[in-house]
Every structure is written in C-alpha cells, then in structure tokens.
Amino acid sequence: MKDEQTCCSAASEPALTIERVETYPLLYRLQEPYGDANGYKQYRSCYLIRVITIDGVDGWGECIDWLPTVDVGFHKRIIPFLIGKNAANRLALTGAIKKWHQRAATAVSMALTEIVAKWAGISVCELWGGRLHEQIPVYASMQSYVERSDWQKQSLRKVEQALVSGFSLMKLKIGGKPLAVDQAHIDQVVSFVDGRAQIALDANQSYDLASARNWERCFQRWSQPIAWLEEPLPLVQTQAPHYHMLRQSLSVPIAGGENLGGLEAFLPFLRSESFDLVQADPQHHDDLEAYRCTLAGSRQFGARCSPHTFDGALSRLYALMAQALLPPYSKMPDQAIEPIEWDVMENPLTQLFFIRLANGYATVPSGSGIGCEPDMAIIRAYGWDGGTY
C-alpha cells in the first residue's frame, strides 16, 4: 500500500497534475456474427478513458477487455491512484498500473502521452522524434466466416468491397474449416482478385507443422504470390523451432506475434529467425514505449514490422504514428514502410477517431497530440448500459 501512495507523486509542473478521469465503456452488438478459427464474434467493444489535468489539458486512452471487469478496476483502483499525480511521469505510473491490469496500463499510457504532447504544443509523432512518413499503407482485415452455408459468397462480397474501396492488400482467415474447404475458398478468392490485390492468410494458430506445410501446394500452384501466412502454429516459446522449420519449407513470408507483449516475448522467435514480419499490437504491451521498443528491436533482427490493430480505433492510430517513425526497411521505392491492419468488418467503433484513408494509404494526423478528437455521436450511440452481453 505504501508503494501505491508514494509512487509517482505529483511534482514540478502543476499544470500536468491529473484532476479527473472520465470513462466511456462502449458496446456494439453485431447484426450477424462473424469470426475466424477462434469462433464467432457476437459483439465489438471498447473502453475509452479521458484523463484531464488541472489546467484543462486532456488525453484519450483505450483498452479492449471485458467491460464489467475493466470498469470496476478503473473506478475502484486506477482512477483514485491517478488523481493528483503528475501526467509527465507516465512510465512510472503505467509501471504501477500494469501490476493490476496490463491493458488498463496501455490505455493510461496513451492518454498521458497525448497530454504531454498537447502541453508541449506538438504532435505525438514530434514528441517521439518526428515522422519519416506522411502516409502509411494499410490492408483490409476480414473475418472470413459467418454462420450460414453460403459463407464463401459472403467472403467474396467483402473482398469485392475492399477492392472497390481501393485496398491493394487484404487478409482473409483460414483454419476454421477443414483444410480442403479453406483451400477451395482461397482458390476462389485468388481467381476473383486476379492480381488486383495481394492476399495474406491468417490461420489463428490452427495447425500443426505437417498441416501448415500442406499449404505450400497451393502457394506453388497460384500465379499470384501470397503476401504472408500469419500464425499457422501455436504461438508459445517452445514452438519457435517449429516456426523456424516452417519458414524454411514455405515459399511465403511467415508473420505473427499479435498476442506477445514486449520485446522479451518476441526474442525466442527473433533469435531463431522464425518470423519475416512481426505483428506487435499496442494493446498487448504495458505502455507505448514498450511497443515502440518491440518495433525497433525487431528491425535490429532483420524482421519487418506490420502491426496488428484489429481491436481499437485509437490503438490503430497510435500504431500508425509509431509506424511513421520507422526508417525504410528496404531501398525499393514501393517498400518504404510496412502496412498496418485496417478492420473492414461491421463495427462502427472503428470510426471513433478519424483517419484520412485513400487508395489503401492512411494519412498520419499532424495536429497537437493525436491530431483528432473522438466522434462523440458514436460514443453517445453505443454507450454500454451496464447489462450482460
């Protein structure tokens, strides 16, 4: 208890003293469930916080978790802990909060980072050192399965919508159906796309080594190369050698790591050269600095970085800004920076924070802080009523 009372006591700059914290739990019930190899989603949710200093400087944060639990945690413990603290001490504050709830610590890290940037009158990118890219490529991320017999037709309709919207890269799900069924489906997609876009495949850790290798027959048959194969095997440290063997036996890049938190968790896969693309997610890191450390560390091992951001519009925005700081990974003019994930499924919460999108590229906001404010109409429309779901 003594540590909680003494950690990060407010000091030096009174303008950055935290006065209050507002919370906005949001819930959207899907009209039709959709999903991947892990099952079907019935809803999409988001827990937004707004931290405000005594001088009126505010910052927004976000986490994705079970709303009843995270709501109690914030109101009973995290908010009382934050009141009166200095927002500039964000590393120490999130270091204490992560012991109680890792994702809540990430949300607080986002809010405090924006406060410091706004107080300095600069953007988060400038706070971090300045952007190297004004635009970042994004890919359309889809959930391939729905609960009806014509799910393949529904999937093809989403692919067509992505093409019309200007996406030149899209990710589809595999691993939730028998191998032959999934391969037949991707056969249809490859034929339909006909070279107009690249295709990535996400297995959500569904296969063993032998089953994953079976996809090489398709890769060799298709004239259009697959952008990457994502998490074909269970992602635990003991599987790093299997990922390495799979990477050696397949003709497509291997991607993964969305649920790994921190560079230390990635090290077994980086040291064994198991990944071509590291897919770190801001939500799964203790704070934004740990997330940026994972990106930079992965590059030192020669791995590309293509962030996972399916859950959370604000997380996607922070991933976009962190990506803008990475140096080019290739001298090829069309490979200056890796793409980030863009959820194109039914989910109005992805529109909470506006990002300009055109022809498969997102423009990095340039205003103070994160450069935009949340859409309060969406917050009012989808506020969680405290009921079960």
Image (cartoon, rainbow, N blue to C red):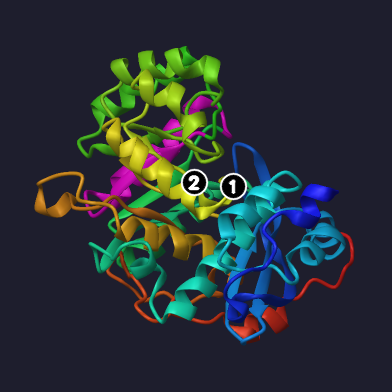
Classify mark 2: residues with Cα within 10 Å, few (<14), some (14-19) or many (20+). some
Q: Are marks 2 and 1 in contact (CB under 8 Å)?
A: yes
Q: Is residue 228 visible?
A: no
Q: Nearer the viewer, residue 129 or 389?
A: 129
Quadrant holding the C terminus: bottom right
Instruction: Say what secondary structure mark 2 lies in.
Output: helix
Place residue 5 in its image quadrant: bottom right
Residue position for label 2? 290
- Residue 281 forms part of the magenta stretch: no
Going by the image, does 8 lie left or right of 187?
Answer: right
For label 1, the SS is loop
**How many badges with numbers are in the image?**
2
Q: Which mark is residue 304?
A: none
Q: Is residue 60 above or below residue 100?
A: below
x and y percentages locating residue 209 in the rendered image? 46, 14
The magenta stretch is 176-203
Q: Residue sitting at 75 percent across and 55 percent down?
A: 6
Residue 123: which quarter of the image?
A: bottom left
Please give the residue where the numbered disc 1 appears in the rendered image.
Answer: 286
Q: Is residue 292 above or below residue 375?
A: above
